[in-house]
Amino acid sequence: MVKDVTVNTTEFFRDPSVWQAMKYRLLPKLHSQKNINIWHAGCSIGMEVYSMEIMLCEAGLLDKSTMYATDINADVLETAKKGIYGHRNAQEYINNYNKGLCVNPYNFEERINTPIQKYMDFNEREDTIKVKQFLLGKTTFKKHNLVSDPNPFRGVKYDIILCRNVLIYFNQTLQNKLFGEFWEMLVDGGTLVLGIHESILGPWANKYEKKGLLYTKKTQ
């Protein structure tokens, strides 16, 4: 039943403005840290996991980042681990990559000219997009139920939690429950990243500072 009812729609660099905000407003603050912990909650087939790995690589932060990813659906986790996807939406993914990673919305004169082929192999004939081997195995994938299970990686505090386009399927009570749990799992000043159509309302709204598309944990 879980496999039938869960929604597994995702894209590489989905909503480029979110990736721009992380690249230029969030990651620069993490350069001084020795270790960075990132959790993708509800990762689906892993396209956004590899998007993050690519962005971290471009920022020179991948080697000191520990990546975690979870989903309730075991089948999509197996797909995520392999990093092999259909070619059908290749041009859309390339466009997202170029907008999210190569364009600086705060300085349009600056542009990164790193092609996406540095990180993925595109084969239209075989109908595949394959994530490069050096990106595979850098993220720990685990089955996890956001509603009922505790922190899936015991004792870990996260600098960034991404839970994008998941909470829109939960009622307000469950949303508030998760906002509280995410707050507890974030380091002081850690960041929660939601989907562009999601927001924190209710009792937990004053526990996070909203900065554009990013939500930073308040400690006071």
Image (cartoon, helix red, strand yellow):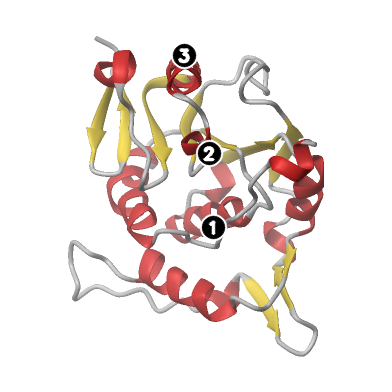
Q: Nearer the viewer, mark 3 or mark 2?
A: 2
Amino acid type at circle 3 is Glu
- The numbered dot on residue 51 is 1
Alpha carbon separation for disc pair 3 and 1: 26 Å
Pointer 3 residue: 184
Q: Quadrant of the N terminus?
A: top right
Q: Is residue 63 positioned above or below 207 on the image?
A: below
Q: Quadrant of the C terminus?
A: top left
Element class at badge 2: loop
Pointer 2 residue: 166
- Given residues 139 and 4, the one toward you in this image is 4
Q: Is tag 3's residue or tag 1's residue first in the polypeptide sequence?
A: 1
Residue at (46, 69) in percent of width and height? 97
- 4 left or right, relative to 169: right
Residue lying at the far bottom of the rendered structure: 125
Residue at (59, 20) in percent of width and height? 156
Amino acid type at circle 2 is Val
Element class at badge 3: helix
